[in-house]
Image (tube, grey):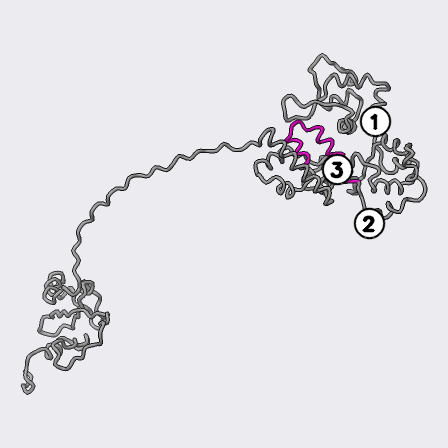
Amino acid sequence: MSPSTFDPSGSGTCTPSRAARELGLKRSEFDLAVQLGRIRTVPDEGGGGPHRVACAEIDRLRALDGFPESLRERVRVVGTAEGAALMGIPAGRFTRLARLGLLVPVTYYLNRYRTVVWLYLAEELSRFATDTEHAHLLKGRTPETLRGQLAAGVDLRARNWRGRHLGFLLRQAGHPWARAGAVAAFLTPVEVADVVRDPYERAHVNRYRPAPPGHAVPGSPSALTAERIMTAQDADEVDWLRSDLSRSVREARSAVPAPRPAARRIPPATRTAARPIPPMARTVTASATAVTPLTAITSLTATTPPPEAARPAEGVADQPSESRAAGIEEWRPRRLPGRRPELCVSPARTTERPEGPPARHDHRSPHPAAAPPSRGLRSWLRRRSPRTAGSAPA
């Protein structure tokens, strides 16, 4: 089948690429014709795909007088130099008229120097040049009010293109949430979050938010330039888009609420019945004050190994024993020749201070202070023995 022959016996619609071939247009010309409403499209039956062209629409366009030159002339675009020549004015005057918003661009592209080149519809430029109301703008001196705006740096080309592109996106939107997403495409994410507070509604709006035109790599200079052109800059334009977005979200919410995750019902926590704590085994604990010297001596002699095995080395400090853990102080004196070492146990000293003033003790106290461990067993027994003051030592 030749590319200029269309077979309507197939399905009722065809893809945009096939429709552009049947109409004798380039793909860019076909897309512009769709944006301008020259070619009517229908949504994809499967959903989610690009719009398709009905076979009846292709038949209608092919039946026009002067097809395909007439259709191609209606979507022809020109730049600044060609547009100025078409209108019969200098290129500088053409640029000033475009900056003032009198000439509205229809599309743009970036040249190899990454400069924005605005394109205008040739049909609109011809109509503007032939209108008698604009004759004073094409010849003579520019009015004072317009010159003041140019001196202030007014440039409405990007803003006029955004208004035109928004109209195209709204015509392509098939439901209320898609229209809200088309309006949100010209606002920053911060502005959208300020208008649409609900996170689920905001996510649904961003789902239908169209990307800037072009096929630039995300993050590239071309993509950043396209994003800057797509975003509203002036305060009055931002306020108008915010109010339009708020109205579109209210209409979409009343028509079809935004989807939300299903609420999961958490069952109440079951509390187990309290169980009694089993009784603990009885333990017998004895305080240090209840241990008598006789009991301590009996227990220590029963657990103390023979003197030969338990004799400490000469000049080595005594190690703590089990009697120390029971609250009893223990001294192991050096072994004397010809005598079995004995064990002397005295109550442990307490570090707690009495509540009242300390009691006074004289030299005849029934509880004399214990001798230091370094004096030995013989000196300690000599002091404890009941002898008279005048008796001679044995």
- In the picture of the structure, the residue carrying the numbered disc 2 is 152
Residue 159 in view here: yes
Labels 1 and 2: the sequence-earlier one = 1
The Cα atoms of the two marked residues, 3 and 2, are separated by 21 Å
Residue drawn 12% across and 62% down? 299
Where residue 142 sits in the image (x, y, percent)?
90, 44
* Res 242 → quadrant: top right
Q: What range of the chain is rendered magenta?
A: 157-183
Where residue 26 sits in the image (x, y, percent)?
79, 26
Labels 3 and 2: the sequence-earlier one = 2
Residue 112 in view here: no
Residue drawn 65% across and 35% down? 247
Query: Is residue 75 part of the magenta span, yes or no?
Result: no
The Cα atoms of the two marked residues, 1 and 3, are separated by 21 Å
- Comparing marks 1 and 3, which lies closer to the viewer? 3
Where residue 95 sits in the image (x, y, percent)?
86, 41
Judged from the image, the secondary structure of the residue bearing numbered disc 1 is helix
Where residue 120 sits in the image (x, y, percent)?
83, 34
> Dominant secondary structure of the magenta stretch?
helix
The Cα atoms of the two marked residues, 1 and 2, are separated by 35 Å
10 or 86: nearer the viewer: 86
- In the picture of the structure, the residue carrying the numbered disc 1 is 74
Quarter occupied by the C terminus: bottom left
170 or 277: nearer the viewer: 170
* Res 44 → quadrant: top right
- In the picture of the structure, the residue carrying the numbered disc 3 is 162
Q: Amino acid at mark 3?
A: Arg
Q: Amino acid at mark 1?
A: Arg
Labels 1 and 3: the sequence-earlier one = 1
